Image (cartoon, helix red, strand yellow):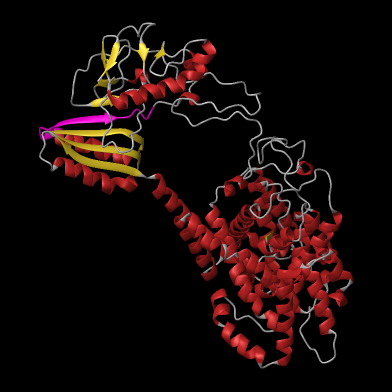
Amino acid sequence: MSGAHGRRHAAGGGARRSHRNGQSGGPALPGYIPGPPSYAPDTAPHSASNAAPTFTSNAAPTFTSNSAPNSAQGSGDSPEWGGAEALGRDHPPPGSEGPRPGASAGRIDFGTEITASLVVFLVALPLCIGVAVASGVPAELGIISGVIGGLVVGAVRGSTLQVSGPAAGLAALVAETVMEFGVAMLGVIVLFSGILQIVLGLVKLGRMFQAISIAVVQGMLAGIGLPLMFSQLYPMSDSKAPGTPLDNMAGVPGLIADTVTNPQALIAAGLGIVTIVLSFVWKQVPGPVKKIPAALVAVGIGIAVASLPGVEVKTLQVGNLLASVDVPGPEQLSGLASAGVITAILTFTVIASAESLFTAAAVDRMHDGPRTRYNTELIAQGAGNTVAGVLGALPITAVVARTSANVQAGAKTRLSRTLHGLWLLAFALLLPQVLALIPISVLAGVLVHSGWKLFAPEQFPKMWRQDRGEFAVMTLTTLVITATALLEGVLFGLAAGVVLAALRMSQTVIRQHIEDDTAKVVMAGNATFLRLPKLIDALEGAAASGKPRIRLDLLGVTHLDHACRSQIEEFVAQQRGAGLRVELLMPDLTKLPAAAEPRAAREEPAFTEVPEPVSTEVWDYATVGTAAVGGTGPMPAGTGAGPGPDAEWFYLDTRPMPGVPESRPPLSRRGRDWAD
């Protein structure tokens, strides 16, 4: 082999085999490797810690270090691991990574967990009541669902910090269902939706929700936070929200005008603004007092102001929980014969599962604790909805606003989310008079702050600087969720992410130029149907050049789908029918990488003698011996003995060199030497 390109390939082959030569005692010469080539170098023992990476031919690097962390699919703290659970299902085995920074294995900070549960309780209480009212059912049913979300779903170790309860994303669907079938049938629909969720979790369908783009996750968080902020501006001023997020945004100027002219509404808005300011600046307060949650401080201020004479702001009102329980009977169960009820059950199952598990993917990005076990979490959500259906309550999903408050309050275990359900139950049953002292505007201010944290406006310019394609996916997801609903927006974002990935995976470089009497087309990268227009233009340009010979060099192609292959084959057949000579250089894309071949095949590779080319019209690229042979089929077997023990072997890199308009022509066999 001559020329710089040949020297480069020879040196590359020597570098790839230096590890094996070092083990066998042979010299690691830069220009050649004695003996037949091996496409699977000897691997280092897997027990070696911090071992150097080993490479195989045509394969991705393999690292044998035992200490590589996996933050995206991390195992989490040791107390969260169950010894009886089979390893490798939802998480890597315990011990695959060390304790996370700031985590103390086996210890629970009860003070932090209790204060976090109180913060979540304050956030969950108005949400439970608001979602119930928006769904057209008594407010008590929302509280019952919140209690179940804490005590039932919260006790299962599916997602450590995720908090469940009635969600605004299902309010419109619940309202429509109640109008069509009545409140009594709601329990049956929720009951069987929960049973179906448990079945889906048992058959391991929860893990598929892990395949979600970070842009979609961040867009979902922003799409939840933005409408939440605008919807809570109205109760913060003791007013009623118009309805949809777009209506709420459009009505803000009128809300401000009405508030400044109403003294009582102005007091309520002032309490909400004080709550928001405290939520932002309270952590900057010096001394141990900053450990008290800002929401609790705001509630204390709100209760004090609301108790002053002359102040008439709206406070929470809760009725009898036990009287609102409606267990489905035989009459309701007979409704399962209705096709509309079955459709409602399937719809609730899909939307509730998707919202919960998409939220779990988003929540995992909020903290560095144990990752979500998706199948277990889906079973937990199903158990919660089963209990909610038996009691005739609202459907349960994971709720980002409560979860965000839980994470921001410093919770580390599932104790906080379980306790928040206990606080809901205790206060609603035993201390309704205490709840009646809390101004609604204060709780609305807490939600406005949570919505701002979810919206995270600083993430948009950051994403713009990092990846403008992902920025478009993130922005579109946020806008569609705001304009429609959570599920529709997430599905739109996922579709946009798939389209973006398909376009980027179809990066193909096609160059067409003339050299002497040959029209050449050089192609590299992933050739998919998305690049057919570009490929057709290059082929037609080569055919229109008027040259007697056409060379199609596809050695740099790493993937050739059926559409592109068919187009090339049709072009070759047409041009040959017109009397032109066509040379087709094709890579062997059907051979398995060395790492995927059986061990026996890697240890004793078989070699075939390379015959002299019999035709110059069509070339197929064969990987054995880096030889190119004539013909359109695979390399013929049994054509002679393999190379001798003193044969010299070179590694030919098929990737196109930067700045070189075409790949080097393939090698041919001349006696014992390889030459151009």
**Closest to the observer: 510 or 353?**
510
Residue 665 locus on image (x, y percent):
25, 26
- Whether residue 333 is visible, yes or no, is no
Q: Residue shown at 36%/24% (left/top)? A: 9
**Closest to the observer: 76 or 283?**
283
Of the 4 image quadrants, the one containing the N terminus is top left
Tell me which segment is drawn in magenta: 576-590
Is 98 displayed left or right of 25 in the figure?
right
Q: Quarter-wise, where is residue 441 in the image? A: bottom right
Is 398 displayed left or right of 226 in the figure?
right
Q: Quarter-wise, where is residue 638 in the image? A: top left
Residue 497 locus on image (x, y percent):
47, 53
For residue 589, above or below residue 512: above
Of the 4 image quadrants, the one containing the C terminus is top left
Residue 359 locus on image (x, y percent):
63, 57
Residue 418 magenta-highlighted? no
Q: Residue shown at 73%/56% (left/top)? A: 384
Is 617 displayed left or right of 402 in the figure?
left
For residue 377, above or below residue 426: above
**Closest to the observer: 545 or 7?**
7
Numbered label tally: 0
For residue 6, above or below residue 343: above
Q: Quarter-wise, where is residue 162 in the image? A: bottom right
Residue 491 locus on image (x, y percent):
51, 58
Instruction: Work out which residue is located at the far right of the displayed protein and give it.
Output: 430
Q: Residue shown at 59%/59% (left/top)? A: 351
- Whether residue 42 is visible, yes or no, is yes
Residue 578 magenta-highlighted? yes
